[in-house]
Image (tube, rainbow, N blue to C red):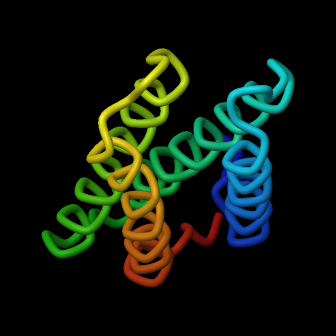
Amino acid sequence: MSTQISGVPALVAAFAVMALTGLLLSRTAPTYGTALLTVHKLAALVVIAALVIRVRAAHLDAGLPAGGWAVAVVAGLLLIAAIATGGLLSALDHAPALVAVAHRFLPVGAVALVAATVVLVPLPAR
């Protein structure tokens, strides 16, 4: 299985696309286009896929310590929560303020924990 998608450049690019499209969406809502929203969602899926591929490859290579698992699982949960709050923002006409605030802060925590995962879970040397 190729682990190029789980490399640091791919993660940085996906986060950059996610942040840029998120900024554009926040500035243009509710008139944003479907293409912009789709790119934003696909970038989030790329980050999740990269995280899963990286953790799986490291686990199959030499096993993964409990700390690596814990950080990776919490990062994944934060990413899923960010996607859920983003879905609520795009689906509801008037989303509760808590959802909007959560969607601003969850990705920041996810970036920090994905970065920690990159440090704690190295790619296998295959």
Horizontal placement of 7 versus 52: left or right?
right
Rendered residue at 75%/25% (across/down): 38
Q: Quadrant of the N terminus?
A: top right
**Looking at the picture, does residue 118 appear above or below residue 53?**
below
Quadrant of the image occupied by residue 74: bottom left
Residue 63 is situated, as x and y percent measured from the top left of the image, at 28, 63
Residue lying farthest to the bottom in this orientation? 119
Rendered residue at 39%/64% (across/down): 105
Residue 20 is situated, as x and y percent measured from the top left of the image, at 79, 58
Rendered residue at 44%/17% (across/down): 92
Given residues 20 and 119, the one toward you in this image is: 20
Horizontal placement of 89 versus 65: left or right?
right
Given residues 83 and 60, the one toward you in this image is: 83
Quadrant of the image occupied by residue 6: bottom right
**Looking at the picture, does residue 8 appear above or below residue 2?**
below
Q: Quadrant of the C terminus?
A: bottom right
**Looking at the picture, does residue 72 appear above or below residue 109?**
above
Rendered residue at 75%/50% (across/down): 27
Residue 32 is situated, as x and y percent measured from the top left of the image, at 79, 29
**Looking at the picture, does residue 106 appear above or below residue 109?**
above
Residue lying farthest to the left in this orientation? 66
Count all numbered tags in the image, as a single digit.
0
Given residues 113 and 97, the one toward you in this image is: 97
Residue 101 is situated, as x and y percent measured from the top left of the image, at 36, 55
Horizontal placement of 74 versus 118: left or right?
left
Quadrant of the image occupied by residue 36: top right
Given residues 89 and 11, the one toward you in this image is: 89
